[in-house]
Amino acid sequence: MELASSSFKIPLMYEVVINFNGEDIQRKFVSHLDSALSAVGFTTFLHHPNADNPIHIQQPILNLSRVAIVVFTKSYSQSSWCLHQLQQIIRWQETYCRHLLPVYYEIQPSDVRLQMGDFGKAFKATAHQTFSPQQLRHGMSRWSHALTKAANFFGWDESNYRSDAELVDKIVKTVLHLPVLSATKFPVGLQFQVEDLIRTIKYKSTEVCRIAICGQGGSGKTTLAKAIYHQIHGTFTEKSFIEGEDR
């Protein structure tokens, strides 16, 4: 099946935000996860303090996203930036009822949940460096709440998998099956179009099916194509989503 689509002109919506700390984990694991998610059609945003211009999660990024994957490592609690941003992610999850998925890479989930071990020591050191004596107790409490809350969600412990490839595959399959494409996120009337096109595809299920989606820039062509892809991808053995250019 081939869907002809084009990039729309409204502000880009990141479907999956990956939050982490450290260039090592980016090279070892996050880059592979990012590539795998992109390969099946998700638009991702790598959210970390080591970028040239680290962006604080605000309305244009997080509030329009559907999934946040937080990669916890031993160095995560060394970054006040990450801990502040985790608070924003928790607030976003509670406000919009979106999906927060933790990954524990070379660290025990209990160390994150209870701020124990080397993770806990770094957490306390970062707090003392960040907050004034008057702010310390309240600041640590807010960070601790965010870490405990995040660690209580369903997630993955890297030590339970034979390889990073196996872990990445498991995460991607889980994200693919999340109810992330709710009708409330579509432009008005798009849900009906998705359902109508899926019915057409199913009717022609024994044939090679090529669908052209035409319209002006910004009319939602890519959004519609991606919505259809996520609805039916599970029925195909081999699949990919490739965005084209406006024509």
Image: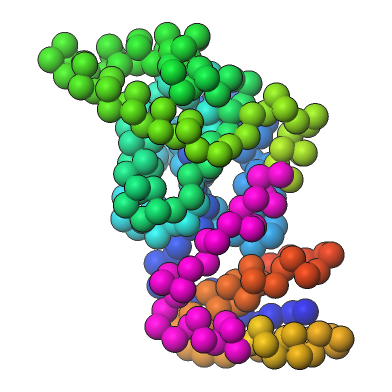
Where residue 122 appears, x then y in whole percent?
Answer: 42, 12
Name the quadrant containing residue 239. Answer: bottom right
Residue farthest along the right direction in this orientation: 206
Q: How many marks?
A: 0
Image quadrant where one finds the N terminus: bottom right
Describe residue 201's horizontal placement relative to residue 184 as left or right: right
Residue at the spot 63% in from the left edge and 34% down from the top edge:
156
Residue 57 higher or lower than 140, as above or below: below
The answer to whether any part of residue 107 appears in the image is: yes
Image quadrant where one finds the C terminus: bottom right
Residue 147 higher or lower than 65, as above or below: above
Describe residue 20's horizontal placement relative to residue 149 as left or right: right
Residue at the spot 58% in from the left edge and 19% down from the top edge:
108
118 and 13: which is toward the camera:
118
First to last magenta residue range: 170-196
65 and 52: which is toward the camera:
65
Residue at the spot 40% in from the left edge and 53% down from the top edge:
97
Describe residue 143's horizontal placement relative to residue 225 as left or right: left
Q: In the rendered structure, does residue 38 fall within the stretch colored magenta?
A: no
Name the quadrant containing residue 207. Answer: bottom right
The answer to whether any part of residue 9 appears in the image is: no
Describe residue 172's horizontal placement relative to residue 78 as left or right: right
- The coloring applied to the image is rainbow
Where residue 35 appears, x then y in whole percent?
Answer: 67, 49
Residue at the spot 72% in from the left edge and 68% down from the top edge:
233
